[in-house]
Image (spheres, rainbow, N blue to C red):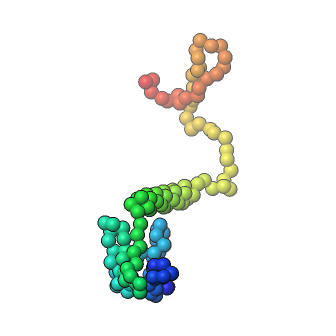
């Protein structure tokens, strides 16, 4: 792909070969040593600048610390969202395999052992009661 740095009055244009990777990221492209060598560029990470010779002087590509920080935060949030999405997909697949068969007929609840009725409020005369197992320990 053709890549150009600079302004209309002072620019440098070169053709670079990029590798397409199979993961999602927040960067559109990552420039490395092959790019720096082709443009004869020098990166300075401390000052967030990339300098290279141009036909009418030095070409400087720069950024701010605020922009670099915002990009870092965005990258971290994006990575977190990807991890949460992958976890959700795994959980949905697991739940899908555990889901009951939709063709199976739903029946009413029938206890497997004896039950006894315990009034919710012994002082009240209404018929509201809980059903509990008759085989439970008295504790």
Residue pictured at 49% horizontal, 58% vertical:
81
Residue ranking furthest to the top: 123
- State which quadrant residue 130 falls in: top right
Relative to 109, say whether 99 is above or below: below
Q: How many marks?
A: 0
Residue at (33% x, 74% y) in the render: 43
30 is higher (above) or lower (below) than 139: below
Is 7 situated left or right of 104 in this image? left
Residue 40 in view, yes or no:
yes
> Where residue 56 sits: x, y (%)?
41, 84
Q: For residue 117, which quarter of the picture?
A: top right
**Would you say residue 94 is visible in this rendering?**
no
Instruction: Where is residue 122? Give x, y as percent.
Output: 58, 14
Judge from the rendering whether residue 54 lies leftward or rightward of residue 119; answer left or right.
left
Is residue 97 left or right of 54 when viewed as pictured? right
Q: Position of residue 61 (x, y in %)?
A: 41, 73
Residue 95, quarter of the rendered image: bottom right
Question: If the image is split into quadrants, where does the C terminus sit?
Answer: top left
Which residue corresponds to the image point at 51% horizontal and 57% vertical from the top-left?
A: 88
Establish if 113 lies above or below 95. above
Q: Where is residue 93 shown, x and y percent of the image?
A: 54, 60
> What residue sits 56% from the left and 31% below the top?
114
Q: Say which of 62 and 37 sits in front.
A: 62
């Amino acid at each position: 792909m053709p890549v150009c740095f600079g302004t209309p009055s002072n620019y440098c244009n070169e053709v670079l070969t990029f590798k397409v990777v199979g993961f999602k990221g927040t960067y559109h492209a990552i420039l490395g040593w092959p790019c720096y060598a082709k443009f004869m560029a020098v990166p300075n990470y401390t000052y967030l600048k990339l300098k290279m010779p141009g036909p009418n002087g030095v070409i400087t590509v720069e950024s701010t610390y605020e922009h670099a920080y915002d990009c870092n935060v965005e990258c971290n949030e994006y990575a977190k969202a990807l991890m949460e999405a992958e976890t959700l997909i795994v959980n949905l697949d697991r739940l899908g395999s555990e889901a009951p068969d939709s063709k199976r007929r739903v029946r009413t609840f029938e206890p497997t052992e004896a039950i006894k009725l315990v009034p919710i409020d012994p002082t009240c005369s209404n018929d509201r009661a809980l059903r509990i197992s008759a085989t439970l320990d008295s504790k």
